[in-house]
Structure formats: structure tokens, C-alpha cells
Amino acid sequence: MPASATKTLRVAVLADSDTRWKWGALTANRITPENSDIRLDGYLLRGRATPTARQLDEVGVQADALHEVTAVQFLHAMREESYDLLVLALVGGGVQAMLHGLGRVWENGPADRAKRPVVVTGYVGVVYEKLADGLLLRHGADLVLANSRQDADRFRAVYEGVGADAGSVTEVALPFLGGAAYTGEHDPYTVVFAVQPSVPENRRDRTYLLNRLVEHARRHPEREVLLKLRSKPGEHTTHIEELPYQKLVQRLDPPANFRLVYGHMGEVLDRTDLLVTVSSTAALESLHRRIPTVVLTDLGVREALGNHHFIGSGCLASWDQLDAGHRPVPDEEWVSRQGVAAGGSASGGGSYDTAFDTARARIAELLDRPGGLPPMAPYYTPVTVPGYLPGLLARHHLGPDGTPLPGTPAADKEPGPVRQIVRRAARGAYRHGVQRVAPVIRRMGEL
């Protein structure tokens, strides 16, 4: 019997936003070997998008312990604590910095530490931009998770194309798919527009989409029309939101059947009859449940919007078409290649429940590897990218060899009350600058 099945598995998740915490924590639960008890410790990387208590509650994933840390504090914790599995739910640059920092930590770790944990990373959703950049920054983890058959093929092609080992690429599925399948219209019929923090990014386009949604509510007073929001004003998600829809809607006079909603996406989908979005991963959640789903073409089908990813899906349509009663029918082959279990099948033709079996098996094998795991070996090193890596590591206060830079605050020292207040004030000032000052300066520049 594997060792992983006879003891509690200690798992750590390092995340830098609410969305990545959701992905990381759910992924950790999906990929741990069967028959394992899990102790899950969460580490939230301190920064502009550190999740608030409300955002953590909305995600609905419970951890046995939660810590807000800097990169150096996290590395110190990894030196002192012994884990079996580590999930890096970070932006690509953060993953690369941690891979180098962790490699140094475990190289010089305690003499009684025989093994390092299995390191896993991946993406929180659709990969539609910076494919090579993001992938190469994640190389070096033991498993680089691909959320679909299509992504797995693309990931391997990138690694093999630069001469890097592609053995870490492991096909899974999005960990937050689930919920009851759509069985028919609700009373009232409910239309949900799932917004995104950074798509589209300008006021004109956002106002256009909001106006069309409000107009749809006016055209169909018998329907409930919901604007599903990601964050409240002052909060940040994975992406910066300079123009929150909450502020834009204040200038309108929407009808009584139009409402703003927050909360868990799965709970909103429970009452959804038509999911509309520009390119949100919510579209894949909706397709998984067989809910009628529309990816808008009003602003064009463009890489900058991310809706180009849905070419071939059968879900592309405009508000004019929707107002006229059009309902797209998803293409089964496209859906299958995205790892979406529409109709009970997931990528590769199996069920969603088995989509994580390969990852579980690989992790169990790595945990039982005689003599432990080899040292971390990212493709990016001071030899392969001498003009890029030092600056990337320095952003996380690490030197070119992965060690903390001189002058970095003590990793084991918690900030005092005054410093905590200053930090909260600084974070609030940053968000104020992003959401209020920056748009004003931009408008002044356009005069």
C-alpha cells in the first residue's frame, strides 16, 4: 500500500489572488491520492490582490490554517515545515521565483529533511495569451497541469520546441466544474451576464455592454436579468479593475427585473437559464452543466478580449441575435477538447470524476520515489536567460541564485500593529489610485 494512503497528507497552497486561491485549494483536493487524509495550509502572497475575508468566504474552500506572507516569509516557512505536496497558484513570474527560491531552500535545508514535497502548478482557467511566456515561467515544477486535452498538446509543443523536458505536463480539468445539470427553464427565466475585471478594459465598451444588458431587461420584463460581479469596490481579483460595473450602473435607471449579484458562481448558475459573457471561464462552468451559453461578439472576436478562444465552440453570438431569440448550440468536439464534461464526458472521452486520475497516480508515484525527488530544475537559469532571470527574481527580493537579497526584512518577524496599519493604508491607497486617480489622469490625457 502506498505510503500516501497510510498517513495524513500535508498540503500547502501558495496563492496571490482570490481566483488563484480557489483554483489552488480545489486542485489540491482533486489531485491528492485516494484514501488520503489532507491537512491543507493556505499561504496568501502579500500584494495588491491579496484576498479579503469576504472573497475567501465566497470561494467556499476551507483551509486548516491561513497565513498572509511575503515571498521570503513563505520560503522560510518551507524551510521549517515539512509538506508532501505544494501547489503554486501564482502568476508565472511568481512561480518561477518560488521554484528558484525553493530549490535553494531545499538544497540547504535541515539535515534531517530527507524529502522535498511534490510541486504542482498550472492555470486558473482559459489560456489565451502569453502561452510561451507563462509556460516557460512554470517549467521546473514536478507537474504542470493542463486543464484540457487542447492545452496539454499546446503545453508539450512549447516545451519540446525549446528543448525543455515536457514530462511534467499533466492533463486534468478545471477543478471547479460541477453542479447539477440544466434541466429546463426556471420561473422566472434568468439571464446572467458574468463580468470580468479587465475585459473589456475601457469605459466605452463596458458602458455599451451594460446598456445592452439593461435594454435586454427592459425588452423582457418577465425575465430576471442579473449582473454577476466578481468583487466589491476596493477589492482586487487576479486582474485590476479600474472601472467597476457598480459605478457605471449608478448612472443608469435599470428596470426592477435587473439586479447586481455577488456570491459563488456555482450558486448563481443553479438558477441560470442563459449565461452571457465576453470570455469568462464561467462560460466553461456553464457549458459543463449544459446551460445555454453565449460568448459575445459585439466588440469583435479578438485576442485582446479572449473570446477568440471560443472560435469553433458554436457559442459566439451578439446581443442583437440574443434579443431576437437566438440560442447557440455548443459544438461537442470543441467542448470535449476543452475538458468540459458536457453530457457526462470530459477530455479524452472519460467522465469528469476520472479527469484527475492521471495526476493522482503521478503524485502517488513521486511521493513513493525511493530516495526522494531530485533537485528543482527549471528551464530558465542564469545560463539560459541571464538578462531576464535576475530582474524577475529581484521583484520577489531574491538574488540570481534564489537566496534573499541583503536588506530583506527578517522572514520570521511578524509586522507590528503600526506596520500592519500602514500596510493596509498603502494597499487602500493603491486601489484608490487604480480605480479613481488613474482613470481621471487618462481622461485628462485624452482632452
Image (cartoon, helix red, strand yellow):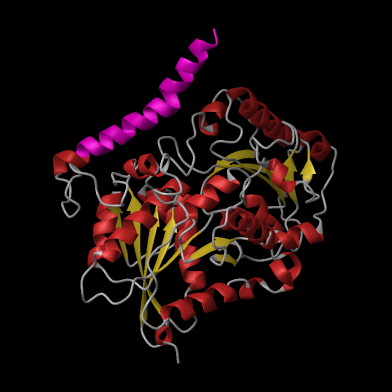
Determine the image quadrant of residue 115. bottom left
Give percent across and percent down for residue 403: 26, 52
Residue 9, above or below 67: below
Q: Residue furthest bottom?
A: 1
Residue at image coords 29%, 56%: 74
Residue extent of the magenta highlight: 421-447
Asked if residue 21 lies left or right of residue 259, the reply is left
Locate residue 119 relative to residue 350 in the image: left or right. left
Q: Nearer the viewer, residue 387 or 316?
A: 387
Closer to the camera, 143 or 229?
A: 143
Residue at the extreme front of the image, as rendered: 383
Q: Is residue 391 left or right of residue 322?
A: left
Q: Which residue: 29% across, 77% down?
A: 114
**Residue 428 is inside the magenta segment:** yes
Locate the C terminus and report the quarter of the image it occupies. Answer: top right
In what quadrant of the picture does the N terminus appear?
A: bottom left
Q: Name the image quarter holding residue 172.
A: bottom right
Up/down of 197 relative to 286, above or below: above
In percent of width and height, residue 254 lies at: 63, 30
Please say whether residue 223 is visible from this viewpoint: no
